[in-house]
Image (spheres, grey):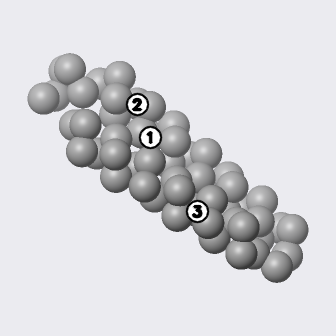
Amino acid sequence: MSREDAERFRAEAEECRLQAAEALKPEDKEAWLRLAADWIKLAEEAYLRRGRFD
């Protein structure tokens, strides 16, 4: 994974946070925030692995 992957994953997480802010139902907000957390985990993994794949 590359630095570009990490940046894209962070952008996806931010979009999920924005969707969570717009959500009307608490369960929808929670789901969006869980997705954001998953994207952040992927971004962190990409950042840690970037040296191996770049």
Residue at numbered disc 2: 45
**10 up-or-down from 26: above or below:** above
Q: Is residue 21 left or right of residue 41?
A: right
| Residue in front for this viewpoint, 13 or 38 | 13
Residue depicted at 56% across the width and 46% down the height? 38
Q: Amino acid at mark 2?
A: Glu
Q: Earlier in the sequence, mark 3 or mark 1?
A: 3
Question: Would residue 47 appear left or right of 51 to someone viewing this image?
Answer: right
Quadrant position of the C terminus in the picture? top left
Given residues 7 and 52, the one toward you in this image is 7
Residue 16 is marked as: 3
Residue sitting at x 44%, y 31%: 44
- The amino acid beneath tag 1 is Leu
Which numbered circle lies on residue 15?
Answer: none
Q: Amino acid at mark 3?
A: Cys
C-alpha separation, residue under disc 2 versus residue under disc 1: 5 Å
User: Label 3 to label 1, Cα distance in Å?
Assistant: 14 Å
Image quarter for residue 47? top left
- Where is mark 1, residue-wise? 42
